[in-house]
Image (spheres, rainbow, N blue to C red):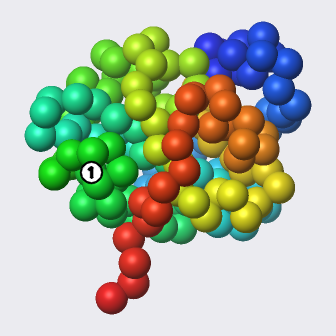
């Protein structure tokens, strides 16, 4: 049981958990999840923490098949600049290890932004709080549980 799963259960949100054998040699946690679970990468979302120029940490949730656009998450957060947060800050703030970072049940609740592509899906998958464990739920429920806001976050192809 992880804080992410506990949060979904306590809130009474319909969800399913999916476990797979994590391979430490795999280069991408999200793409590994898609491959091992047989799910399209557009349905698996990664949780990324960025730091704004104000030093505030915020969460961006985007499909593993996409890249997080720093200008777009900064704009969504009402800031001018954003950069990937240092790993130590992410782990300290969330209580999770990298590769098992869930947007749900973080130790310190951060403002959360979910890419608008999620709204087109019946359900999506995010980390359930450890490597090799995913939680599947409706995008609206993810937004409700994180007090998240939908925004255009994915980098556009040039």
Q: In the image, 98: left or right of 44?
A: left
Residue drawn 42% across the image and 60% down it: 153
Q: Is mark 1 on a helix, strand or loop?
A: helix
Q: In which quarter of the image is residue 88?
A: top left
Q: Quadrant of residue 4?
A: top right
* Nearer the observer, 90 or 140: 140
The image shows residue 155, relative to residue 47, as above or below, that is below
Furthest residue to the left?
A: 53
- The part of the image, by quadrant, that contains residue 157 is bottom left
Q: Residues within 10 Å of mark 1 (few under 14, many from 20)?
A: many
Residue depicted at x 36% and y 51%: 76
Q: Where is residue 12 in the image (x, y as percent from the top left)?
A: 85, 19
Residue 122 at x, y = what percent? 83, 55
Does 88 appear above or below 27? above
Q: Position of residue 137 (x, y in %)?
A: 78, 40
What residue do we see at 79% from left, 51% from top?
Answer: 123
To which residue does mark 1 refer? Answer: 74
Position of residue 148 in the picture relative to residue 81 (left or right):
right
Task: Answer left or right for 40 relative to 85.
Answer: right
Q: Report the quarter where the N terminus lies.
A: top right
Could one spot residue 19 in this view of the protein? no
Spot the residue most to the bottom.
158
Q: Which residue is at the front of the view, 81 or 35? A: 81
């Amino acid at each position: 049981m992880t804080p992410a799963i506990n949060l979904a259960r306590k809130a009474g949100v319909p969800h399913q958990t999916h476990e797979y054998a994590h391979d430490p040699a795999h280069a991408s946690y999200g793409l590994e999840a898609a491959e091992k679970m047989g799910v399209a990468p557009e349905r698996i979302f990664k949780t990324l923490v960025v730091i704004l120029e104000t030093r505030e940490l915020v969460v961006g949730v985007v499909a593993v098949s996409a890249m997080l656009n720093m200008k777009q998450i900064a704009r969504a957060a009402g800031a001018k600049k954003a950069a990937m947060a240092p790993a130590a800050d992410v782990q300290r703030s969330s209580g999770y290890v990298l590769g098992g970072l869930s947007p749900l049940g973080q130790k310190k609740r951060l403002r959360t932004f979910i890419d608008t592509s999620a709204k087109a899906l019946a359900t999506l998958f995010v980390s359930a709080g450890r490597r090799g464990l995913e939680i599947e739920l409706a995008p609206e429920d993810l937004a409700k549980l994180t007090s998240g806001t939908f925004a255009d976050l994915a980098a556009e192809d040039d």
